[in-house]
Image (cartoon, rainbow, N blue to C red):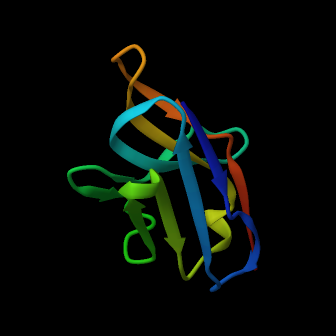
Amino acid sequence: VQLQASGGGLVQAGGSLRLSCAASGSIFSINVMGWYRQVPGKERELVATSGGSTTYADSVKGRFTISRDNAKNTVYLQMNSLKPEDTAVYYCWGNIWDSVYGRLNGYWGQGTLVTVSS
C-alpha cells in the first residue's frame, strides 16, 4: 500500500491551498484517512482525520476542511485563511486493511511542504 500526497506549495497569508493524497496498492478497505503536519524540531501533530466522523485540531477548525472520495481512495485537505504558523510539511496517513495479508495497518505518505508567507 502506498500513499501519494500532492498539492503543497508557497502561498501568502490569507490564501488557500488544497492537498490531495491517493492510496493505492493492495487495499481491501480504508478505515480512516487523515493529515498530520510537522515543523522542524517539533513533533508531528494531528491536523484532521476522516473516518466514521471527522476531527480537527483546534488550530485549524473553521479554516480547514477534510474530505474523502472513497471511490478513488483519496483524501483531500482544503486549507483556507492560511497563516504563517500553518507552515509545515504535511503528511497524509491511512488506517488501511491490506487485501493480501488481511491486516489493518497505518501507512504514511511522503509529505508535502506548505509554506505560508506573511
The residue under the point 22% across, 55% down is 53
Q: Is residue 40 above or below residue 59?
A: above
- Decide: is 35 above or below 11: above
Q: Quadrant of the C terminus?
A: bottom right
Residue at position x 70%, y 52% from top? 112
Counting from the top left corner in percent of width and height, residue 34 is at 43, 49
**Relative image position of residue 72 (x, y in whole percent):** 46, 56
Q: Is residue 30 left or right of residue 36?
A: left
Residue at the (54%, 80%) spot, across then down: 80
User: With 95 as the anchor, is 88 left or right in this view?
Assistant: right
Q: Position of residue 67 (x, y in %)?
A: 39, 65
Residue 70, compared with residue 92, is above or below; it is below
| Quadrant including the N terminus | top right
Give the number of callouts.
Answer: 0
* Direction top: furthest residue: 101
Quadrant position of residue 14: bottom right
Image height of 2 relative to 114, above or below: above
Image quarter of residue 30:
top left
Q: Is 5 left or right of 66, judged from the image as shown?
A: right
Extreme residue toward the bottom, this view = 14
Q: Nearer the viewer, residue 32 or 73?
A: 73
Image coords of residue 65 (percent x, y): 42, 70
Picture residue at 38% right of the left edge, 77% below the top:
62
Task: Tell which residue pokes out farthest to the left in this image.
Answer: 52
